[in-house]
Image: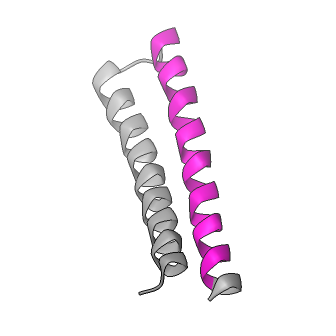
Amino acid sequence: MCVMELISLSFETAGTLMIAWAALSVHHRVLNEHKITSKVFRIMRLEQRLGILGMVFVAAGYALHVFLL
């Protein structure tokens, strides 16, 4: 496996896992809190940023895979 393919696969995997984690965390927090407080909003904003970063990783992994291999 070439280095670029490994980097591409790593970005895609990390991005997918970050998106999944962010989505599951939000649902878990809302279920446990039973209400949305300022703390929940703050954590949801952080998880939203992680989800966006995850999407960037997935896109970067795809671009590396398609254009460099």
| Figure check: 46 above or below 42 | below
Where's the C terminus, which quadrant?
bottom right
Magenta region's main secondary structure?
Answer: helix
Indicate the position of residue 48 as horizontal and vertical percent values.
57, 37
Q: Which residue is drawn at 44% across and 58% down?
A: 14
Instruction: Please indicate whether residue 44 sits to the left or right of residue 68 in the image.
Output: left
Confirm whether the magenta stretch covers residue 31: no
| Figure check: 34 above or below 27 | above
Q: Which picture quadrant has residue 30?
A: top left
Q: Residue placed farthest to the right in the image?
A: 67
Indicate the position of residue 26 as horizontal and vertical percent values.
42, 35
| Figure check: 11 above or below 28 | below
Looking at the image, which is closer to me, 34 or 51?
51
Looking at the image, which is closer to me, 47 or 41?
47
Q: Residue at x 45, y 66 (%)?
A: 10
Looking at the image, which is closer to me, 65 or 58?
65
Indicate the position of residue 2 as horizontal and vertical percent values.
47, 84
- For the magenta stretch, what is the residue range? 38-65
Confirm whether the magenta stretch covers residue 63: yes
Q: Residue placed farthest to the left in the image?
A: 32
